[in-house]
């Protein structure tokens, strides 16, 4: 089931192409707001893309109203990007009652591998979580 784009995603320029059946694809047209002082896309932009896409891949497997939260994520960067369009493909690889394991990769518009990531997500009963009580 496809998910609507959030204000945060729109702010960064990320577009959700699809999010269904444990798979999420998103795209980003690189512009100056994504650049580090080294004149390449900041690694945090790519981390945000894979985290968002991996989470959406998990949510696409859950009943309506349920959600997830990132427990752990790891990323490896392979090459810089200075322009063009990048695409992330994320898959929910394994799911238990309480957690889900995901993998994602980002490729540039010439299909070169930019980075790969993995993530573990806690499954939640509701999409939005209230702040926990503090003891």
Image (cartoon, rainbow, N blue to C red):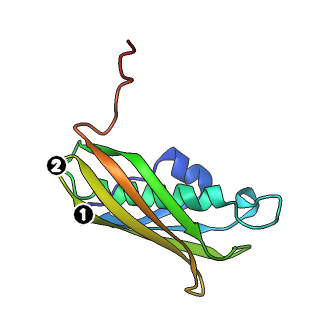
Left or right position of 40 against 59: right
Front-lying residue, 35 or 97: 97
Residue at screen point 26% across, 50% down: 99
Residue 63 picture location, percent across and down: 17, 49
Residue 73 picture location, percent across and down: 46, 55
- Asked if 133 appears above or below 74 in the picture, the reply is above
For label 1, the SS is strand
Left or right position of 80 against 131: right
Placement of the N terminus among the 4 image quadrants:
bottom left
Residue 78 picture location, percent across and down: 62, 76
Q: Quadrant of residue 104?
A: bottom left
Left or right position of 101 against 36: left
Instruction: Name the residue carrying label 1.
Output: 94
Residue at screen point 20% across, 47% down: 64
Q: Residues within 10 Å of mark 1 (few under 14, many from 20)?
A: few
Number of numbered tags placed on the structure image? 2
Residue at screen point 76% across, 61% down: 32
Instruction: Name the residue carrying label 2.
Output: 97
Front-lying residue, 75 or 22: 75
Residue 76 picture location, percent across and down: 56, 68
For label 2, the SS is loop
């Amino acid at each position: 089931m496809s998910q609507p784009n959030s204000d945060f995603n729109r702010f960064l320029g990320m577009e959700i192409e699809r999010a269904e059946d444990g798979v999420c694809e998103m795209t980003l047209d690189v512009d100056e707001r994504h650049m580090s002082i080294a004149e390449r896309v900041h690694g945090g932009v790519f981390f945000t893309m894979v985290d968002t896409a991996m989470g959406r891949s998990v949510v696409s497997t859950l009943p309506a109203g349920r959600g997830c939260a990132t427990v752990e994520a790891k990323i490896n960067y392979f090459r810089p990007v200075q322009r063009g369009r990048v695409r992330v493909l994320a898959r929910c690889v394994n799911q238990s009652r309480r957690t889900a394991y995901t993998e994602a990769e980002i490729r540039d518009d010439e299909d070169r591998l930019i980075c790969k990531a993995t993530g573990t997500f806690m499954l939640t009963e509701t999409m939005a979580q209230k702040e926990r009580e503090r003891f």
